[in-house]
Each structure stands twice: as C-alpha cells, then as structure tokens.
Amino acid sequence: MIHIRQAFKSDERSVYDLITALMGYPLDREAFHEVFVRNIHSESVLYYVAECDGGRDGDIVGFGSLHIEPQLHHVGLAGEIQELVVHETVRSKGIGAELVSRLEEEAEKRGCVSIEVTTRKRWVDAQRFYERVGFKQTHVNFTKALITQKHQLKVMTDRTVSDVIVAGLSSWGVEYIFGLPGTTCLGLVDAIRRQEGMTFVKVRHEEAAALMASAYAKLTGKVGVCLTIAGPGATNLITGLYDAKMDRAPVLAITGQVKLQYVGPGSFQEIDQDALFNSFCVFNKTINSKEQTIELVTLALRHALVERGVSHLAIPNDIQKEPLEADIEPMEGRVPDFRISNTGLIERAVGLIEHAERPVIIAGWGAKDQRDNLIKLSERIKAPIITTFRAKGIVPADSDLSLGVLGDVGTPMARRCVDDSDLLLVFGSSFSEKTNIPRKRTVQVDIDPMNLAKGFPIEIAILGDCGVVIEQLLDRVGGRDAETVSEDVRIEKREWHAQLENEADPRVAPLRAPFIFKVLREVIDPDAIIAIDVGDNGFWFGRNFLMERQTLLMSGYLATMGFGLPAAIAAKLASPDRQVVCITGDGGFAQVMGDFLTAVRNNLDITVIILNNRELAMISMEQMIEGYPKFATELNNPDFSEYAISCGGAGFRVKEPGELRGALEKAMGVKKPAIVDIGTDPGRF
C-alpha cells in the first residue's frame, strides 16, 4: 500500500538515499543539508514522499515538492508543483498522479488560487538543481542508459506548450529567434534554449529584434521570428514589425502575456495586445488554452508566408508551462506552391512585346532572384533593364543592358528611356510613388493581386511568380535584330558614370560622399550583402554606388532610421559565408548602437560604415527646400571608433581622404565586428 506524507527533518536520510539513487553516486552531505533539507519546514517549499508498506523503514518510491509563491495580498497564493520523481517499477501504478493530487490538496488548504504543474522534459534540465547540492558540471552525466537502467528512478516528464511551439517553429525552418527574455516569456525562452538547431539572438532593444526578423525574412523568404515580453516589450516591436508589413516580409512576432487570471483588470505590464497588433497584422491571436496551440501556431505561420505579412501570437505565462503532448506538422504540404502564372495572358503579352518598338524592362524587388532570366529576356527582345531602388543590383551597373535605378535617386538615362518607351514590362514592382512609373502601355507581373494595376489601369496584369512568367515568355517570344540600348543612351550612360567619377574628389576634407562611395565600390566584395540605413547615406548610395552582384537590404516603404545595423546582423546570420556591410549615418546608427554589442556577442564580422556628418543632413535639406531655417538637426556624437573598441569590436576613424581605403580594408579583414567612423561633409553639392 502506498502512503503519501509530508517529509520532515527526520526523513533527511531517506530523501538523501532517494536522490543518491537517482544520481547514481553519493551526494555532498553538507551541501545537501544546507540547500535541500533546510527548506523542509519552509512555508514556501513543502516536500512530500510516497512510500510502500512492508519495506525497510518504508521504501520511498516517489518524491515531489510544492513551491508556494506569495503574491499580492489581494490575490492570495499560487502553488507550483515541481520535480516529480517516481520509481520506474511503480510508475505504472499511478504514483505520480497520486503525488500531484495530494500536492494539489495541500495547495488548496493553503489558499492557493492557482496551481501550475511543472515537470522536466529532459534529465539535463534537472542539472541546475543538483549542482546546487554540491555537484560540478563535469560530474553530472545524464544519459539514456541511466534513464532505462533497472531499479533506477525517473523524472516524470511532459512536454510543455512552449516545447511544442518551439519544436514546431523548427520544423517550419526557423533557425533564429530574435528577442529579449523576460518574466512573461521565460517558458518560451527556455524551450528555445533546449531546442536543437535553434538559436536565440538576444538583442539590446526589441525594436532591433523586429527589424532583424524583418530583414531576415526579406533576404531569405523564410519566416523571421521575434520574441519578447508583454507590455513594453510588445510595444517596442512595433516599428520593426511595421517595416515588415509595409515591405511584405513574412514575420511572426511572439509576445508573452500575463497569466490568464490577471488578464483584464489592468495588471502589471498588461496591455491590450490584441488591439495593439490588430491594426497591422494579417493574423493576431492569443493562445488561451493549450488545446489551441497546434492550430493557432500553424495558422500564424501560414498567414505570414501566404499573405507575406506579420502574424502575432500572445501566449500567457501560465499557458506556456502547461503540459502538452502534440506536434505541429511541418511546413511541407501546408503552404501552396506560388510558382504559378495566369497562362492565358502570356500569349497576349507576347503579342504586345513583338509589336513594341521601344520596350523597357522594369525589375522590382519581387524579381530579385531572376537576374539570369531577366538578362536573357532583355537580350532576346532588345529591351534595357531598369530597376526600382530596392532592386538595385539585380543587373550589374557596368552591363550594357543596365540603365540603373528609376526614381528619386535614379539615373537620368533610366528616366529618359522609360519616358520614351512604348511598352513597359514591369516585374515585381509595387509602383511606389518614389519610383514614379508613368502611366503608359504596360504588362505587369506580380504574385500579389493588389499590386496589379495599383495606381491606374494597365494593358495586361498577370498574376503569377515572376520567374515562371519570364520563363514562359522566353519560351514564346521571338528575337530581334535591333540594339538593346541605343547609341544615344549609351553615350548618356557613359557621361553619367564620368560625372560620378568627377564628383569623387579625393582632396577634400571632411570627405565628401561621392568619394566615399567610389572607394566603397572598389573595396566591397562583388557578392556582398549591403544593408543601408535611411537618411543622406541612402541618397548617396542610391545615386553614386555602382553595384555588381551585391544584394541590397533596405527599409522600403516605412523608411525607418536604424534599419541598417539590425539588418546587417540578420544578414550575417542568414549568410555567414558572405561579406556583410552596413552603410549608415550617425543619426541612424545612434538609434540602434546598443546592438553593436549583439554583433560582438555573436562573433559576426560585419563592417559598419558610418557617414558621420554630425547632422540629420536629409532633414536639413528638406528644411531648406521648404523654406525653413535649419533647426534641431545638429548632432553631438561620440567617437564611434572608440565605442566599437570598448564593445569588443574593431574601430577605425577616418578624417582624411588618404586614410579611407586603408581603414576600410583593415575593417573588412579583422574577422570581428568593426566600425569605420568617417568624418563627412554634410553638404550635398
């Protein structure tokens, strides 16, 4: 017969013997007494043993503890049942269930208003407890053999809601979660710690976590995930999540929430997260019971990928710890194949192309992976390629086919060619007013039906994947004899590039932006990923940096300062073998500079180029254009190179033109996060 009773000091020997059997070798008795037994009479920790009749002094076959946490006086006490241990040979008799039942009774007697049953998923999770009773890390050896040995004791382990969520994210290809730990998300953070193949990237500010998730999603097409606490953590995510929303990047934001019993009356750090996230999320739910976990997590991931937007899940603290034996199905078979096209319109498009005399291709971000196909189509139909700013670099700038960027930071020959064309073939562009695609005969291809004919009626709107449609066009369209780019346009392009060279004066200090970008394009790897910030640095990059095969990351529609550094960190994690360069201004960098420490902590050899003009130069320019006096745009900056060194990175300061190339080459070769702080002239021309 089994008896369950509270353990008192006289049971120290029995409990010691039990834990010794569990570990397989003797405990440090003094440490055991000090750390373990001293709490037996504590009001906050109660220990219980289950013992069999007929054995020597009653054989202990089960052991459990009840931790009672004092809460605010008006809500009483909360009980947490932990560390349930039963003998392997009697587990089938339900000793664990009897222990739980008894502990729940005791908790109720003491006025607890909630009970949480916390069990251990793996042996290693108990490691921290046993270290407290005198073991060193190297002495703890939890193995499968120990678990299955006859007559050994076994921790009763259930997976939790957090475990299921994190394992499910992993099965959907999530490798990195960006965020900060805190009270209302500790269950999730611990599940990430234990999930093989998952890395928690701890940031210094939640805005950076959301920007990293957005940049990661833009670059890879996978779901970017960020995680933080309820309340202020959730509100700090908003800027980065809006960046993802507006640039159509699939992101999942996970926030903790206060325990369900405290939701509603305005508890500590409780905000109405449903209302907060509803305004911009494609999916927004709170997991109010463990039974909802599988469906809601799957829906959140599917909505993010299918609708290319932001999903949000709030998970109350107590729900995170609930036991749950379930698995989220992997992504395969749950997300449709988007390599589709409206084939009925392809023949009509071919007809327009063959009758056009001056066709022009405009490639947007949605066609960023179609370099080879775009070049083939351009050569076949003799149409030059022009890109949006976000798609800058799809075709190398020195290619005869490339006429540069269309829009505010574009080239004169791109605008001239588009204005003179009689047919525009627009692939993967959302028709931003910053690009200013004119109203004329157009064939547009986009996977998002809302982008088709977005601003005005067009001739043919093809719903489909750019790659599929271009391949279908290549199968059907005939070749031409005319030149792809006219001689007049070639001359204009040569003159434009010569002008950029002439602007790059190597003699002026403080250094002028055209010279900086000339040197940058000479030293940056042709296959690098370049993350740019918002401000005058972005203007000069768009206008003066001639790309080869580099990939550009930017904040497009939201255009938020501070994007560059978090984006570079995410890019290096996603593509560790590629060079990653962040180009930012002193204003944008200062907003997120704390997360340079994140790059250092994760040993990410990114190079941060700061155009330090001690001013919000773009705002000063806008004040001048609108007739306002310059006001509130000056900046007092630290020595950013010294800051980099103090963080554990490398720092270089450039004051003279002759120092620039050497500093850049050293920064790109140190194999650690580096900052190049360049004193820059705030004037444009």
Image (cartoon, helix red, strand yellow):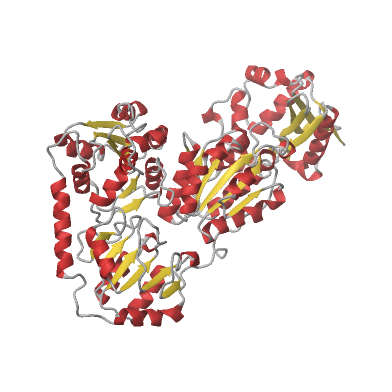
Which of these two is toward me, 497 or 153?
A: 497
In the picture provided, is 642 more to the left or to the right than 433?
left
Q: Is residue 76 visible?
A: yes
In the picture provided, is 649 more to the left or to the right than 254?
left
Residue name at image x 49 percent, y 48 percent:
242
Q: Is residue 581 visible?
A: no
Q: How many marks?
A: 0
Q: Quadrant of residue 643?
A: top left
Q: Is residue 130 above or below residue 117?
A: above
Residue 173: where, in percent of width, then height?
50, 54
Q: Is residue 219 above or below residue 104?
A: below
Image quarter of the N terminus: top right
Q: Quadrant of residue 633?
A: top left
Residue 322: where, in percent of width, then height?
70, 43
Taking the view exactly as shown, the residue that stands out farthest to the front is 627
Residue name at image x 71 percent, y 26 percent:
17
Residue name at image x 69 percent, y 48 percent:
324
Which of these two is toward me, 41 or 472?
A: 472
Q: Is residue 292 above or below residue 679?
A: below
Residue 158: where, in percent of width, then height?
68, 44
Which of these two is toward me, 133 or 396?
A: 396
Image quarter of the C terminus: top left
Residue 660: where, in percent of width, then height?
19, 37
